[in-house]
Amino acid sequence: MNPDDIHDRWAERTGAYSPAYYAHYGPNETSELLGAIIDRVVGPDAAVLELGCSSGRHLAHLHDHGYDDLHGVDINESAFEVMERVYPDLAATGAFTHGSLEEFVRDHEANRFDVVYAVQTLQHLPPEAEWVFDELVRLTDSLLVTAETDSDESTADAASSTDDISDSGSAVTDVRDVDGVPLYVRDWSRVFADRGWVELEDEAAVLDYHTFRAFRPPAE
């Protein structure tokens, strides 16, 4: 599946994994882990960006705990309609962009955000979009968090293949089909270690659907 097709699938998503779906379930354990580590590393004055924010359940958790400089990008326009309905205070306070994360990361200066995080979003970037990872470390000043399917996890209900790994230099170790959308499995520790960032290994946690990992920039 090419990148445009992947964008279209998420832009038109309804039902499972749609903005309304995530708003229905609300903040969860991942939200709590995000809030805890952001509190420890930077605190509530931080500028925080979520990539693939959907209807904003994780950002809403941060807002409820004193964070106001909140930003999000999502390709599904209905995400912001759901946000206004379910999390109106967040929608009124934060800054949100409708569009692809590939477009978004190109349009901001270095170290623009204190914290950048993604929850089950980067795993849908195909190998040809791995340049985005370089942009993420450029944009992030203090803390980068991933909550993605990791190469050391097993997903019993997902079809698995290596046929779609088109670039031998890619970080992709496996490709899975999840409800009609490709999921590119990577070793996320290595992805950002290869870019000089240091993992906070004590913060890593294997959850039901992804592994939570946190990274700091290299010491100067």
Image (spheres, helix red, strand yellow):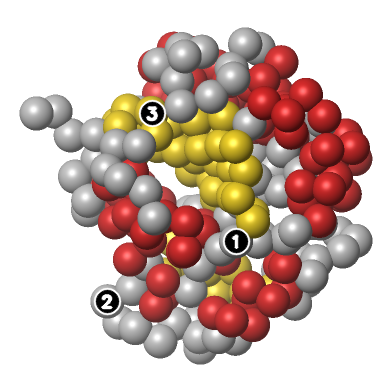
Q: Earlier in the sequence, mark 3 or mark 1?
A: 1
Question: How many neighbours does mark 2 have within 10 angstroms: few (below 14), some (14-19), or many (20 or more)?
Answer: few
| Left or right of residue 179: residue 39 | left
Answer yes or no: is residue 32 visible.
Answer: no
- Report if the CB atoms under discs 2 and 3 are less than 8 Å apart: no
| Left or right of residue 50: residue 155 | right
In percent of the image, x 75 and y 58: which residue is there? 77
In percent of the image, x 55 and y 74: which residue is there? 175
Q: Amino acid at mark 2?
A: Gly
Q: Nearer the viewer, residue 119 or 95?
A: 95
Q: CA distance from mark 3 to mark 1?
A: 21 Å
Residue tagged 3: 114
Residue tagged 2: 169
Residue tagged 1: 99
Residue ranking furthest to the front: 92
What element does badge 3 sit on? strand
Question: How many neighbours does mark 3 have within 10 angstroms: few (below 14), some (14-19), or many (20 or more)?
Answer: many
Report which quarter residue 26 is drawn in.
top right
Answer yes or no: is residue 197 visible.
Answer: yes
Q: Nearer the viewer, residue 37 or 80?
A: 80
Position of the N terminus, as image quadrant, is bottom right
**Above or below: residue 83 compared with residue 47:** below
Q: Nearer the viewer, residue 45 or 157?
A: 45
Q: Amino acid at mark 1?
A: Gly
- Give the image location of residue 2, x and y in percent: 55, 85
- Give the image location of residue 115, x and y in percent: 43, 31
Report which quarter residue 7 is drawn in.
bottom right
- Give the image location of residue 86, x and y in percent: 88, 34
**Depth-wise, is mark 1 or mark 2 nearer the camera?**
1
Q: Earlier in the sequence, mark 1 or mark 2?
A: 1
What element does badge 2 sit on? loop
What element does badge 1 sit on? loop
